[in-house]
Image (cartoon, grey):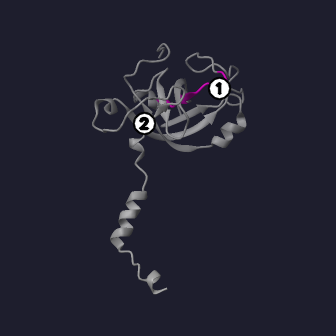
């Protein structure tokens, strides 16, 4: 019994173990296009030219649906004229984000969401630093999504996936 009590752990050992258990910072995680398994961003070296091309913005995310009660009489037509269909991975952005380099057709990665999303819609002028994640017609999914603080990654100089009609 005295042998069990004789094992003492120094404070140095406890601190060392604690630092080993801390997860790596989010900046080292590469956003991925889950459909293809291809990294959108490699941030292994934060000084690399590739990492420098990416912008990161902390903002608020909510969700919306293509139903008349939330939009207008044409709920499946986005602000730039794109037809929204359930299952699409698209977002609406507040207009201040357009001045920061996001564009119609920009590919984005949102920490906490699966895969990449495409900017296809604009939000009302009253919103600032905000995105709306498109949830098709599933109103309960949008309500369950709620309001979240997220980090959005994008490349201002990336070729657009749709014609730029701004």
Where in the figure is residue 29, as x and y percent of width and height?
42, 40
Image quadrant in which you'd find residue 26? top left
Q: CA distance from mark 2 to mark 1?
A: 24 Å
Image position of 45 with respect to 119: above or below = below
Q: Which mark, by number, is residue 87?
A: 1
Point 34% across, 29% down: residue: 53
Q: Nearer the viewer, residue 140 or 37?
A: 37
User: Residue beneath label 2, please?
Assistant: 30
- Specify whether 98 is left or right of 92: left
Whether residue 127 is visible to the viewer of this picture, yes or no, is no
**Which is nearer the N-term, disc 2 or disc 1?**
2
**Residue span colored magenta:** 85-95
Where in the figure is residue 91, as x and y percent of width and height?
56, 29
Image position of 57 with respect to 91: above or below = below
Where in the figure is residue 5, as x and y percent of width and height?
45, 83
Whether residue 67 is visible to the viewer of this picture, yes or no, is yes
Badge 2 crowding class, 10 Å Cα cut-off, few under 14, some 14 to 19, many 20 or more, is some
Could you say whether the residue bearing mark 2 is in a helix, strand or loop?
A: loop
Q: Is residue 1 magenta?
A: no
């Amino acid at each position: 019994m005295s042998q069990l009590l004789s094992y003492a752990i120094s404070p140095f050992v406890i601190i060392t173990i604690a630092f080993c258990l801390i997860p790596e910072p989010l900046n080292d995680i590469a956003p991925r296009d889950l459909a293809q398994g291809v990294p959108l961003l490699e941030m292994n070296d934060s000084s690399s030219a590739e990492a420098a091309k990416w912008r990161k913005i902390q903002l608020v995310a909510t969700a919306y649906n293509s139903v008349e009660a939330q939009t207008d009489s044409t709920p499946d037509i986005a602000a730039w004229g794109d037809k929204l269909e359930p299952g699409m991975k698209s977002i609406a952005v507040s207009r201040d984000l357009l001045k920061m380099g996001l564009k119609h057709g920009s590919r984005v990665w949102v920490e906490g969401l699966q895969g990449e999303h495409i900017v296809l819609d604009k939000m009302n002028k009253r919103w600032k630093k905000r995105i709306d994640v498109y949830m098709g017609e599933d109103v309960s999914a949008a309500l369950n999504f709620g309001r979240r603080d997220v980090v959005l990654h994008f490349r201002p100089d990336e070729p657009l996936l749709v014609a730029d009609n701004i």
